[in-house]
């Protein structure tokens, strides 16, 4: 995992024309999306539509990602970050177990100090509709950003912790990053997508984070 410094980021939503600034504490983020091999080691499951040990796991719901995080924490002797009861999930912010990044953490990490729509030339950093040949690719096949994080744009979307807009979309969670089947417009640091936490599709995966104890 890559340790990222504290900083700040401004998020924006094209639908509502709203923007908001967020202070981000230092945290750790996985350099790669969770692979199918990693997912199987923790859960014993292979849910993906296309199989390969170094392919990112996909066809996983937000709830699946939460359960993976808790399973990985328990296996490492760490306190789980999430308390799960039926469809209710609460985050223990004092835990340093594995978890999903917040939306602000995700965009802050993706930008890696840059201010433009992307941290590099799209074809050099991302698998998207224009170069993916309509399938998912192994993690780490494109150039990383300045902080050593791979595939922050393209390949598979990343689930984030946050609810997208509770007043309008109820429990729908945030997705970030764009995927292998998306047009280049969707593969930008600021693009927000939403989906129901039970939703599974072959261009949605996740990466994991950990808080830094103070």
Image: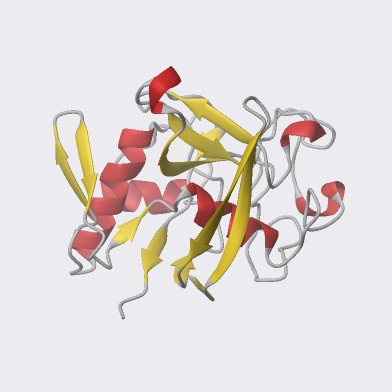
The number of callouts visible is: 0
In the foreground, 68 or 81 = 81
Measured as percent of width and height from the top left, residue 63 is found at 31, 35
Q: In this rendering, would 61 be left or right of 203?
A: left
The residue positioned farthest toward the bottom in the image shown: 214
Q: Is residue 159 above or below residue 10?
A: above
In the foreground, 143 or 87 = 87
Measured as percent of width and height from the top left, residue 94 is found at 22, 65
Q: For residue 139, say whether it is visible.
A: no
Q: Residue at x 28, y 57 (%)?
A: 72
Q: For residue 17, say whether it is visible.
A: yes
Q: In this rendering, would 159 be left or right of 113?
A: left
Q: Is residue 172 above or below residue 191?
A: above
Q: Is residue 78 above or below residue 19?
A: below
In the foreground, 104 or 142 = 104
Q: Residue at x 39, y 31 (%)?
A: 61
- Image-quadrant location for residue 81: bottom left
- Image-quadrant location for residue 203: top right
């Amino acid at each position: 995992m890559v340790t990222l410094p504290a900083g700040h980021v401004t998020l924006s939503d094209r639908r509502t024309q709203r923007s908001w600034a967020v202070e981000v504490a230092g945290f750790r983020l996985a350099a790669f999306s969770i692979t199918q091999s990693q997912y199987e080691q923790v859960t014993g499951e292979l849910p993906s539509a296309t199989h390969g040990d170094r392919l990112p796991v996909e066809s996983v719901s937000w709830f699946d990602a939460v359960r993976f995080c808790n399973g990985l924490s328990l296996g490492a002797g760490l306190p789980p970050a999430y308390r799960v009861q039926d469809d209710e999930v609460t985050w223990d912010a004092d835990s340093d177990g594995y978890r999903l990044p917040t939306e602000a953490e995700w965009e802050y990490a993706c930008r890696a100090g840059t201010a433009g729509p992307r941290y590099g030339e799209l074809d050099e950093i991302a698998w998207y509709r224009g170069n993916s040949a309509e399938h998912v690719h192994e993690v780490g096949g494109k150039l990383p950003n300045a902080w050593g994080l791979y595939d922050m744009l393209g390949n598979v979307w990343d689930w984030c912790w946050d609810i997208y807009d509770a007043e309008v979309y109820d429990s729908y969670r945030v997705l970030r990053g764009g995927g292998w089947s998306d047009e280049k417009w969707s593969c930008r640091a600021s693009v927000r997508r939403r989906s129901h936490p039970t939703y599974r599709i072959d261009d949605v995966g996740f990466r994991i984070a950990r808080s830094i104890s103070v």
